[in-house]
Structure formats: C-alpha cells, structure tokens
Image (cartoon, rainbow, N blue to C red):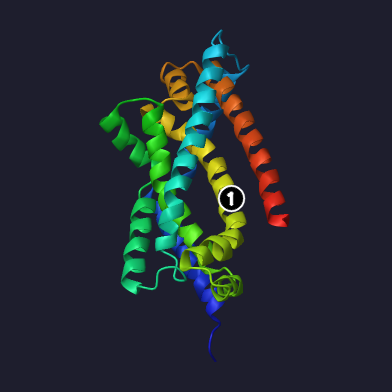
Amino acid sequence: MRLSRTPVLFATGFALLLLGLWRVDASPARLWDGLAKLGWLVALMWPPSAGGALPDLLEAMAQTLAMAFLGTLLAAAVALPLSFLGAGNVVSSTLARFTVRRAYDGLRAVDSLVWALIFVSAVGMGPFAGILALALPDIGTLAKVFSEALESADRRPVEGVRSAGGSRLHAIRYGLVPQAAPVMLAQVLYTLESNTRSATIIGVVGAGGIGLALADRMRINNWDEAAFIILLILVAVAAIDAASRRIRMRLIRA
C-alpha cells in the first residue's frame, strides 16, 4: 500500500524547520531574554516625543517621500522603452529577448539596500544616492511586468490597425499600449507604495531622509524621539498606501 505524499512532505518540512532552528540557536531562553529587552525598549519609547525637532523631522519625511516618488518615476521612465525589447509580440528574435530579460533579472537580483551602499560610496551621502538605489532594481522589476502586460494583450486590435494600413509602430501605439497601460499604471503605483517603505530603510545607511534621522536617534539611545519617528513613518506609509490603493482600484474597474 502506497503512502500518501502529503504526510511525508509535512514531516520533511517540519524536520527541516527544527534543523534550521537548531542551527541558528533559536532556544526558548534566548527568545525570553529578547522579549524582556524588547519590553524594556518599549518602556523607554513611551511617551513618544519630537523633542523640539518636529520641523526637521517633517522635512526629513518629505525628503523620504520625494526619494520614493522620484525613484519610481525614474524607474518607470527607463523601464517603459526597455519593456518593448523584452515582449515576444514586439521583438521576434529569441536571442534578443533572452538577453534583455536576463538584464532585467540582473537589475532585480540586487536589493535596493545593497545599491544604496554602493551609491553612497559612489556619489556621497544624501537623497540622490537613495533615488538611484530605488530606481535601479525597480527598472528590472517594472520592465519585466510591463513586457508581460504587453505580451498578454489581445492581438485583434493590433491586427485591426495593421489591416487598416497602419505601420508596425502604429500597431504598437494604438493596439498594444492602450491595453497594457492600466496594468502598467497600477504596477507603478504599487511600486511607489513599496518604495515609500524602502526609502526609509535605505536612509539608515546614509541615503538621507527620515531613515537617517531614525538611525541617529537609535544610535544615541534617544528612544522617545525614535518612537515618534516610527509613528510618523507609519502614518505617512498608511496615507500613501490608501491613496495608491484607491487609484489602482479605479484603474482596474476602468
């Protein structure tokens, strides 16, 4: 009688989980000590306070939002033309598409935090390094998604434009792009949401913005101001997420 594969897979997964926890020394004692220290830090954070630096913190938050917006805009502007080179219904050469798609993968393979460390060393600390660090991996991600949106478009509008005497460029402009545009815009908005959070993280390594201010407060154990900055980040990210979600829903319904 053959055994079902499901219990075997569950048992194997559970064994791997236990092995991983053992290898990282995830003991209950360490967990208990960590929770105790976390409670101590939370006590130091209460009540949150701006400490007289509210104007500077709001300016840093605006800088972070500007980094997210400009990084997303730059990535979308570069990814749009690149996406046509990776779409099978635009470029017929398999070798060319393969090369372009591997370039997408190369850009996406390195996280924005690593790019931030590279660009801080290359162009110096500040928001410019953060914009470049956000844009570079997003170019690969958006180009891949845009090319897939182009490939999934209905061929009939394209054939209609060509049968009416339109050129290949006209077929792409009036047959492909209008179908893929809502998907592209929705993905750009989602990327903006993600970059709002990522811009905070890369600020910690010197890319400017509110993340740098948070790292400074934590470095000097000024936990009440750190708590205020965390709350400020939560409010800003929630506002961007809500606005972006409403716009995306309108695009999807349209």
- Quarter occupied by the C terminus: bottom right
Disc 1 element: helix
Q: Is residue 176 visible?
A: yes
Q: Which residue is drawn at 47% across and 71% down?
A: 89
Number of marks present in the image shown:
1
Of residues 1 and 109, the one nearer the viewer is 109
Of residues 42 and 64, the one nearer the viewer is 64
Describe residue 248's horizontal placement relative to residue 60 as left or right: right
Q: Position of residue 171 (x, y in %)?
A: 53, 67
Q: Residue furthest top?
A: 52
Q: Where is residue 191 in the image (x, y as percent from the top left)?
A: 53, 46
Q: Is residue 42 above or below residue 102?
A: above
Question: Within the image, what quadrant is residue 118 found in?
Answer: top left
Q: Is residue 19 above or below residue 60?
A: below
Residue at the spot of label 1 = 185
Q: Where is residue 181 in the image (x, y as percent from the top left)?
A: 58, 56
Q: Residue furthest bottom?
A: 1
Q: Is residue 26 visible?
A: no
Of residues 167 and 10, the one nearer the viewer is 167
- Quarter occupied by the N terminus: bottom right
Of residues 11 and 248, the one nearer the viewer is 248
10 Å neighbourhood of mark 1: few (<14), some, or many (≥20)? Answer: some
Tag 1: amino acid: Leu
Q: Which residue lies furthest to the left in this view?
A: 122
Q: Residue at x 60, y 59 (%)?
A: 178
Describe residue 6's horizontal placement relative to residue 116 as left or right: right
Q: Position of residue 103 (x, y in %)?
A: 33, 57
Q: Residue at x 43, y 29 (%)?
A: 203
Q: In this view, does 234 lie above or below 153?
A: above
Q: In this view, does 112 lie above or below 4?
A: above
